Image (cartoon, grey):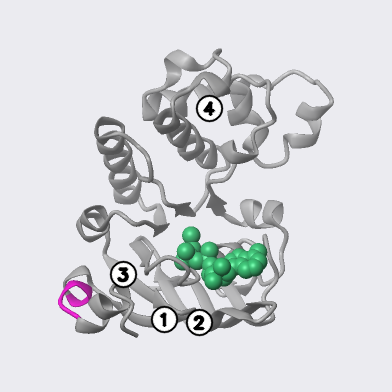
Amino acid sequence: MAVTLEVSDLNKSFGGIHAVKDCSFGVEDGSITSLIGPNGAGKTTVFNLINHVIRPDSGTVRFEGRDVTGKMPHRLTRLGIGRTFQVTRTLGDMTVLENMVVGSSGTGVRSMFGSRMLDHEVERAMELLEFVGIAEYAYTNAEALSYGQRKLLEFSAVLMSGPQIVLLDEPAGGVNPSLLTRMVARIRELNANGLTFFIVEHNMDLVMDISDSVIVMAHGEVLLHGSPDDVQSDRRVLDAYLGKV
Ligand SMILES: Nc1ncnc2c1ncn2[C@@H]1O[C@H](COP(=O)(O)OP(=O)(O)O)[C@@H](O)[C@H]1O
Ligand SMILES: [Mg+2]
């Protein structure tokens, strides 16, 4: 399979902390690839570097062969890289439906100026809310949703722009088992239809169950990149989690 997202020699320091060191890996097109590692390993920083929330000190990010290092998040969205962070940035007093539309590419400014949502946007948003099972809350204030429902909203909002790859930072964190089962089923379904996933997740059962490929980070570096079986049977991975390396 072809590599769709390729990270080469990424480096990022915060003051004296070398959070990401010479990090290189590829995410294969059509795969579910997970990034794991103990707290502080640099996983979220790698996500932020890919999505240009922060700038790398050095290194490149390529998507479909094109250098996208330093491209602004809305440009990346248009190129097909989706990332869940809409809900954490929710503008207070909005319904679930409004959150869906505001999060989608290019509509933010228009919505801010109070224009009406376009019919096709509403239609698409309703389909996606239906797909993740929260359509009944479309006209509810997003703040009234449970934590797990918000995660589902985040997840469906990122699909509004029709991405080719979706980056999920801890999708299962704090989500109850029944909503989690639903989210996993949807991830599998979308993946079966060709959508690539790159996921940071702490729930190891989930990671090992859902992933084609697992990247393990420790101390800012890639320790190992292999199949779930490779990773589970590698002593270095256990040592990293136990803080021995
Ligand atoms: N904005 C920041 N300022 C200073 N230090 C940071 C910042 N973001 C992350 N770090 C540090 O970088 C390291 C990696 O953090 P992070 O990428 O959040 O790890 P993970 O997501 O694997 O838990 C940690 O030591 C963390 O304290
Ligand atoms: Mg993190």
User: Which quadrant of the view contains residue 134?
Assistant: top left
User: 142 or 17: which is nearer to us?
Assistant: 17
Residue type, mark 3 in image: Val
Q: Are marks 1 and 3 in contact (CB under 8 Å)?
A: no
Measure how far apart labels 4 and 3 are at the Cα level.
32 Å
Circle 3: is it few (<14), some (14-19), or many (20+) Cα within 10 Å? many
The x, y position of residue 157, in whole percent, is 53, 36
User: Which quadrant of the view contains residue 36?
Assistant: bottom left
Which is more foreground, mark 4 or mark 2? 2
What residue sits right under mark 2 in the picture? 23
Q: Which stretch is magenta?
A: 230-234
> Could you tell whether 143 is left or right of 26 in the image?
right
N-terminal of the two: label 4 or label 3?
Answer: 4
Q: Is residue 103 above or below residue 78?
A: above
What residue sits right under mark 3 in the picture? 214
Q: Is residue 238 among what the camera can see?
A: yes
> Could you tell whether 141 is left or right of 167 in the image?
right
Q: Magenta residues: mostly which secondary structure?
A: helix
Residue type, mark 2 in image: Cys
N-terminal of the two: label 4 or label 2?
Answer: 2
Task: Single out the residue that lies furthest toward the right.
Answer: 113
N-terminal of the two: label 1 or label 2?
Answer: 2
Residue located at (29% from left, 38% from top): 180
Which quadrant of the rendered structure holds the N terminus?
bottom left
Q: Are marks 4 and 1 in contact (CB under 8 Å)?
A: no
Circle 1: is it few (<14), some (14-19), or many (20+) Cα within 10 Å? many
Residue type, mark 1 in image: Val
Circle 4: is it few (<14), some (14-19), or many (20+) Cα within 10 Å? some
Q: Are marks 1 and 2 in contact (CB under 8 Å)?
A: yes
> For residue 124, which numbered disc appears in the image?
4
The x, y position of residue 116, in whole percent, is 74, 18
N-terminal of the two: label 1 or label 3?
Answer: 3
